[in-house]
Amino acid sequence: MKPTRTIVLLWLGWAIAVIAFQAWMGARIAPQWPDRSLDWTTNFTGTDYQKGQKYLLEPFMNDQVAWDSEYYLAIAVGGYDDPATDLVGPPNNQVTLSYAFLPFYPLLIRVFAIPLGLLGLNPIATATLSGVIVSALGALAGMLALYDLTRDSLGEDGALRSAFYLIIFPTGFFLVQVYTEGVFVGLAFGCLAMLRRENWLLASILASCTVLTRAVGIAIFIPLFINWLRTGDWMDFELDWQQLFHQGISRQSLTRALLVFAPLITFLIWKISYYGIAFDFVERQYFGSTFMNLGRAFYVWVEAGRSLFLGIPPRTANYILIFFLFVLGLVGSFRTIREYPEAAWFSLVVILISVGSGPPSGIHRYILTTPAIFIFLAKLGNNPVFDRVWTIVSLLWMGALAALFALDMWVA
């Protein structure tokens, strides 16, 4: 069987299995409220915590919708100013919490929802189905990109392992929920694969879409820049102005430089737009932080470390997984930095931005978007014992987290 066909069939079976498993868990188990995995979830969660949040109450595919899904659906269906979502800010200057989320994923949901509207579902149900499909297709693109990235060095079996490890990662179920992870890995990993093929145009386009999917996507500029330095084109820009006037810069060098900086320019344009300004406003008003607030990050990570020893089992269990995957992500990035510098540096910057921008409660979801960890695991998976043990451990963890998500408990 051809590797591409193997990946597609594996992806399809995985997506069906995860969705079916979540539906089964939702029908079989009743959660015990409140969720004590974090300090704030103890006070925030309860049997009626979703009351009045219409985007979380639509029964169709509701197991794939929770927490931030509300805002992606709200943007896709009603726009950023949909009054059905929470408002933040002073009474005379309020904006919706939707502005904390970037536009590319909701835009894809809206586009895919157009043909799906023929199914006769209501707008929220249509958007939910669209969001799951978009996420799943992004996951497939991420699998194919990982295979393409690693095939030469790991061989066909190792490359297939890297793709498989992506979708069975403990937080891998997010790749088929109404969340951005699926689209993000498809775009970011696809960009890295295109760089390896020296397809600069497509890599730049994918990178520009990446930065409009999640703010941490700005890290995709790093592998583009590293690759640009490798080509030596940047040396053309070291000519003094007199030489530059007489000799000029080759069209190829200039074009490649523009493609390298395109995602950075895209991000900066978004940041100074109304939406970017509103994003910063919501970050300050609601989250009490700004992008890369290292002082606050240090404090919350220290508090997270202390939570391991408070004697609250749900909290301890939650943070054990968080810290384990965080360390694994760092190790994977450093261990692949020589052979895969673009993927490794991208992974490291994603981790560092994630650590500096918010609490550690979601870091294991961010680790999912770092390609280096799957390359590293695929190398270790050459040992059949590790391969089977990691598969068992990862699937058990993913099943537990997927069930918690379906039951509206906090996961990441």
Image (cartoon, rainbow, N blue to C red):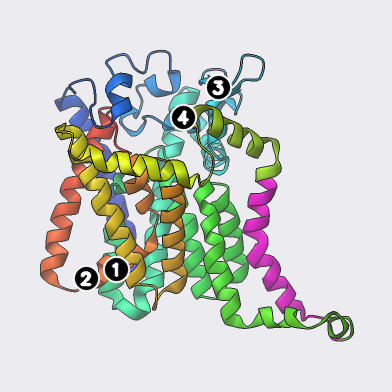
Q: Quadrant of residue 10?
A: bottom left
Task: Verify CB contact (< 8 Å) between mark 2 and mark 1.
Answer: yes
The residue that label 1 is drawn on is 376
Q: Residues within 10 Å of mark 1 (few under 14, many from 20)?
A: many
The count of marks equals: 4
Range shown magenta: 247-270
Instruction: Say which of marks 4 and 3 sits in front.
Output: 3
Q: CA distance from mark 2 to mark 1?
A: 6 Å
- Which numbered tag is attached to residue 88? 3
Q: Residues within 10 Å of mark 4 (few under 14, many from 20)?
A: many
> Residue 119: x, y in percent?
45, 29
158 relative to 287, above or below: below
Q: CA distance from mark 3 to mark 1?
A: 42 Å
324 relative to 405, above or below: below
7 relative to 268, above or below: below
- Say what secondary structure mark 3 lies in: strand
Majority SS type along the magenta span: helix
Q: CA distance from mark 1 to mark 4?
A: 38 Å
The residue that label 2 is drawn on is 380
Q: Quadrant of residue 125?
A: top left
Query: Within the magenta stretch, is there residue 376?
Result: no
Please, what is the three-letter code of the amino acid marked with disc 2?
Leu
Please, what is the three-letter code of the amino acid marked with disc 1?
Phe
Q: Residues within 10 Å of mark 2 (few under 14, many from 20)?
A: some
- Which numbered tag is attached to residue 126? 4
Task: Verify CB contact (< 8 Å) between mark 4 and mark 3.
Answer: no
Q: Earlier in the sequence, mark 3 or mark 2?
A: 3
Please, what is the three-letter code of the amino acid marked with disc 3?
Val
> Residue 160: x, y in percent?
29, 67
